[in-house]
Image (cartoon, grey):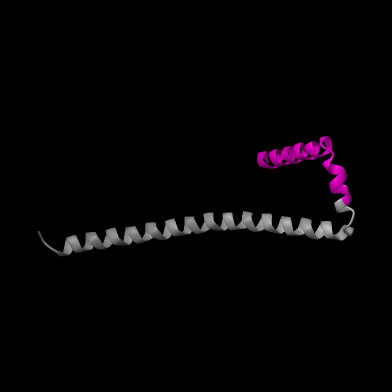
């Protein structure tokens, strides 16, 4: 939530800078050359990239948890084997 608010504030700040420096007139001239549906396509591409990055990060976390659990099981098996060998070999 906090991250989204910061992004929105940053966007609004950049937008206000564009209007103060009259860059918006130049940008509106450029943007008026494209059909309206192009903006939806571009927004879809940006959203898709964002979701891909978000899901990849989430997948890495899940994979890391799984790897840690498997490692814990492996270490437990090694300790059990070590104990069995100690019991088998009289000292």
Q: Position of residue 80 (x, y in %)?
A: 28, 60
- Above or below, 88 against 54 in this view is below
Question: Looking at the figure, which quarter contains the C terminus?
Answer: bottom left
Q: Main secondary structure of the magenta part?
A: helix
Q: Name the residue at 71% across, 59% down.
A: 48
For the record, the magenta segment spans 1-29
Quadrant location of the N terminus in the rendered image: top right
Q: Residue at x 32, y 62 (%)?
A: 77
- Residue at figure coordinates x 84%, y 60% from the top left: 38
Q: Quadrant of residue 17?
A: top right
- In the current view of this chain or complex, which residue is farthest to the top? 20
Q: Foreground: 20 or 11?
A: 20
Quadrant in which residue 20 is drawn: top right
Q: Is residue 13 above or below residue 41?
A: above
Q: Is residue 73 left or right of residue 37?
A: left
List x then y, in percent, for residue 12.
Answer: 77, 38
Residue 74 place in picture, x, y as percent: 35, 61
Vertical arrangement, residue 68 with respect to residue 88, above or below: above
């Amino acid at each position: 939530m906090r991250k989204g608010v910061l992004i929105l504030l940053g966007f609004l700040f950049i937008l206000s800078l564009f209007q103060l420096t009259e860059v918006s007139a130049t940008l509106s001239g450029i943007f008026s050359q494209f059909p309206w549906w192009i903006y939806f396509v571009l927004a879809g591409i940006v959203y898709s990239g964002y979701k891909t990055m978000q899901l990849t990060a989430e997948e890495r976390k899940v994979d890391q948890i799984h790897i840690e659990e498997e490692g814990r099981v492996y270490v437990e098996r090694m300790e059990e084997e070590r104990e069995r060998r100690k019991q088998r070999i009289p000292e």
